[in-house]
Image (cartoon, coloured by chain):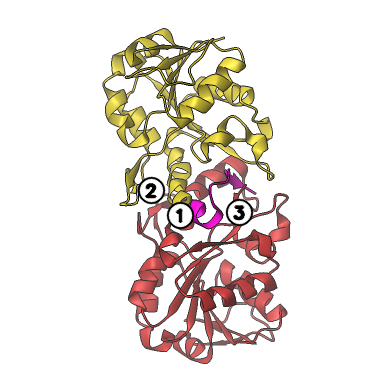
Chain colours: A yellow, B red
Amino acid sequence: MTRIAVLGAGRVASVLAPALAGAGHPVVLGIRNAAPEWLTEPLTHASVPEAVHAAGIVINATPGETSLDRLSTLRTELAGKILIDVTNATVRARDGMPGGLAYPNSSLGQKLQQALPETRVVKTLNTMLFPVMANPGLLTIPATVFVSGDDAQAKQATQNLLTDLGWRSEAILDLGGIETARGPEAMILLVPDLLKARGFSPFALTIA
Amino acid sequence: MTRIAVLGAGRVASVLAPALAGAGHPVVLGIRNAAPEWLTEPLTHASVPEAVHAAGIVINATPGETSLDRLSTLRTELAGKILIDVTNATVRARDGMPGGLAYPNSSLGQKLQQALPETRVVKTLNTMLFPVMANPGLLTIPATVFVSGDDAQAKQATQNLLTDLGWRSEAILDLGGIETARGPEAMILLVPDLLKARGFSPFALTIA
């Protein structure tokens, strides 16, 4: 089992870290402030650089709009590692909802790969409400989970983790290189309208 | 039955015009050049301004990247009508595939509504491969068809046509005003990568 660092202490981290620990992985939470209430054994926590240093696979669950700045400062620590980015980078609208893409016609995934050339960046899990990430069975229609990345081995490691989170192999759609992250990332534009139209019920963008 | 003008003579028009005629609607194709081979009775054709003039509902199936210019010149003819836009406006990449959004963080639907204030613009059907538009049963997973528009009556008329095309009411998702078209339109960014990853098989973007 590879040691996994989950960066962040928000809702996404609170779903992924316990689920991956439950699948048997040693998981360390990389956080800047006090440990969140939901952090219990066997989960551990450390500073962000320490957590990255200790891990082979790093999952970015920090707010997407701050991720490029934050992770760029960790270029040395992240060298040689797999970075799985599950976030969306948006400009906030006045109501606090996603108002526009931070990197229109590009993507946070691609920007991270450019900023971290010694790191193998994989984009996945960013096209669904957070409870679905570790519980695809919540949905009545079989959902799709997209994977984008330049490195085949890193994508295979990511797919193994997706399997651990409950995703069936038929649900996993490898789109190609990291430049293909822009399609799934653009789907964040749908989210505020979906939540208004359907309420706060779990969803995932899916290819029928 | 309202007379419907379908603007265009390409693949999308070749799917929608016969299907709507088959459902009993009088359909006139608005074209600039010679009638396409597939145009047979009861379909008729006319110049674009004549077709628009004769119709209560106009469906835009011209190439999305040219639609704003083309339709802006028809502001007088389109006044008071329902305009259903089913296209995507992209900047072409060197391989001829969609390379980027023509209106990032906005949408063609919204641009059309701004350019045609006396017309009721509805965006729909732009999130799937063209054969699916009039044959949602092609897909094994129940697909979603999104609807965006400012005018409730125009959206109801659009939903009635979607029903005629074979869409079940549970599949139709009214996202809200025309500004919500940007989410579904952004999904065109996925299309070239989907076609490369899965081949040229029918698909539709769906909300699970």
User: Are labels 1 and 2 assigned to the same chain?
Assistant: no
Depth order, front residue of B16/B105? B105
The numbered dot on residue B183 is 1
Mark 3 Cα shell of 10 Å, populated few (<14), some (14-19), many (≥20):
many
Q: Quadrant of the N terminus of chain B?
A: bottom right
Q: Is residue A196 magenta?
A: yes
Q: Which amino acid type is marked by label 2?
A: Met
Q: Looking at the rendering, which quadrant does residue A103 occupy?
A: top left
**Which residue is labeled 3 in the image?**
B204
Image location (x, y in percent) of residue B88: 46, 61
Image location (x, y in percent) of residue A107: 38, 39
Compute the Cα span from label 3 to label 2: 26 Å
Depth order, front residue of A43/A175? A43
Q: Is residue B136 magenta?
A: no
Viewer-nearest of discs 1 and 3: 1
User: Are labels 3 and 2 assigned to the same chain?
Assistant: no
Viewer-nearest of discs 3 and 2: 2
The chain letter under disc 3 is B
Depth order, front residue of A16/A1? A16
**Which residue is labeled 2 in the image?**
A97
